[in-house]
Image (cartoon, helix red, strand yellow):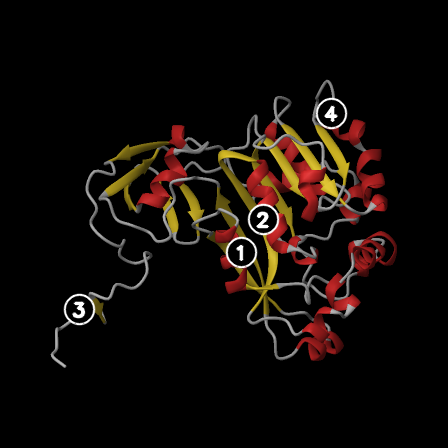
Amino acid sequence: MEHKSVQTYYGEVLQSSDDLQTNACCTPDAMPAHMKAVLSQIHDEVLTRYYGCGLIAPLSLEGMRILDLGCGAGRDVYALSAMVGESGYVVGVDMTPAQLDVARTHQEYHADKFGYAQSNVAFHHGYIEQLGDLDIEPGSFDIIVSNCVINLATDKAAVLRGAHHLLKEGGEMYFSDVYADRRVPQVMAQDEVLYGECLSGALYWNDFLTLARGAGFADPRQVEARPLTIENPKLEQRVAPLKFLSATYRLFKLAGLEPACEDFGQAVIYKGSIPHAPHVFALDDHHVIETGKVFPVCGNTWMMLKETRFAAHFEFIGNFNTHYGIFAGCGGESPFEIDGESAATSCC
């Protein structure tokens, strides 16, 4: 699918979120109270031109420098600008001039709304597959976000490589997107409506994991996922038998991450000090860490907490001196275990 088709769909065909034909580019109603409070301050015109599929506001954002890939009319940019504070900075990139015009119109409005002396956001016109062409310094962002946009990109691998290049060491890519349960047939991928509705450009989930690792993100972590029901009978028939889901992933730029979760006998204790998370911190969908509780972790998870912006919020137990093999429960299958028992030897 060409860029021009997507630009037309989002710049001319869609005038508000009400014009969408499926629920793929829609965010579920449930969201944290602090997010609702921030979004209530966003200008109405910006809100009506929102086409995301998830929440892309990870915790501990004060003072962070954030890049939003495919920012559209700027809803997430402005929400994040409130969360990073006046000392933080948020940059949005989008290829659709009509969307950027809306975003730029309301910069002063949001600076005034959040009580800032000057705007802490900037917008760039460009393609997320060609981030190297933008006047942006490599390794200059703490966090890169994206909300239901990478599926629209013509070269997903290039997007991930570019994001890795722009992140600081210890930074993360935290984004929501649509994924398919199998590879999308070529004829479906050429359907402009299905593509614009964030369906036929979706990656097969296992291909995404391969691309992420190839770009340098060694251990992709799924934060949450929900099935997409389409809710348009005609379009449901056109995509059948494929199934789709919206998922949020976090990808850390850490040079020492291993391909599998390895056990070094380590553990962490969460201090409960991250704003809006006094009782529990969820790193991903299988690392939900209660405040004050000793929580065993693999080496990769240890690094994701100790060598990132989260370090000050944890106590760390152990080191990398002794390796105990694969981490039970999330490190992959060991050939030494069959159905949870030690494998028996046999002769030929």
| Res. 41 image quadrant | top right
Q: Where is residue 209 in the image (x, y as percent from the top left)?
A: 50, 58
Q: Are marks 2 and 1 in contact (CB under 8 Å)?
A: yes
Q: Which of marks 4 and 3 is in front?
A: 3
- Is 189 left, or right, of 245 in this rendering? right
The residue carrying mark 1 is: 211
Q: Residue 341 carries which label?
A: 3
Q: Residue 119 carries which label?
A: 4
Disc 2 marks a residue whose amino acid type is: Leu
Q: Do the residues labelled 3 and 1 touch (CB within 8 Å)?
A: no
**Mark 2 / mark 1, whichever is N-terminal:** 2
Q: Distance between the residues labelled 4 and 1?
A: 35 Å
Badge 2: few (under 14), some or many (20 or more) residues near its Cα, within 10 Å?
A: many
Look at the image and tell me whether residue 40 can be seen: no
Q: Are marks 2 and 4 in contact (CB under 8 Å)?
A: no
Look at the image and tell me whether residue 244 can be seen: yes
Disc 3 marks a residue whose amino acid type is: Glu
The residue lying at 79 percent from left, 66 percent from top is: 192
**Mark 4 / mark 3, whichever is N-terminal:** 4
The residue lying at 31 percent from left, 37 percent from top is: 269
Badge 4: few (under 14), some or many (20 or more) residues near its Cα, within 10 Å?
A: many
Q: How far apart are marks 2 and 4 (CA)?
A: 28 Å
Q: Residue furthest top?
A: 117
**Mark 3 / mark 1, whichever is N-terminal:** 1
Q: How far apart are marks 3 and 1 (CA)?
A: 34 Å
Badge 3: few (under 14), some or many (20 or more) residues near its Cα, within 10 Å?
A: few
Q: Position of residue 190 (x, y in %)?
A: 75, 69
- Is 283 left, or right, of 176 in this rendering? left
Q: Distance between the residues labelled 2 and 3?
A: 39 Å
Q: Residue 160 carries which label?
A: 2
The residue lying at 86 percent from left, 45 percent from top is: 98
Q: Do the residues labelled 4 and 3 touch (CB within 8 Å)?
A: no
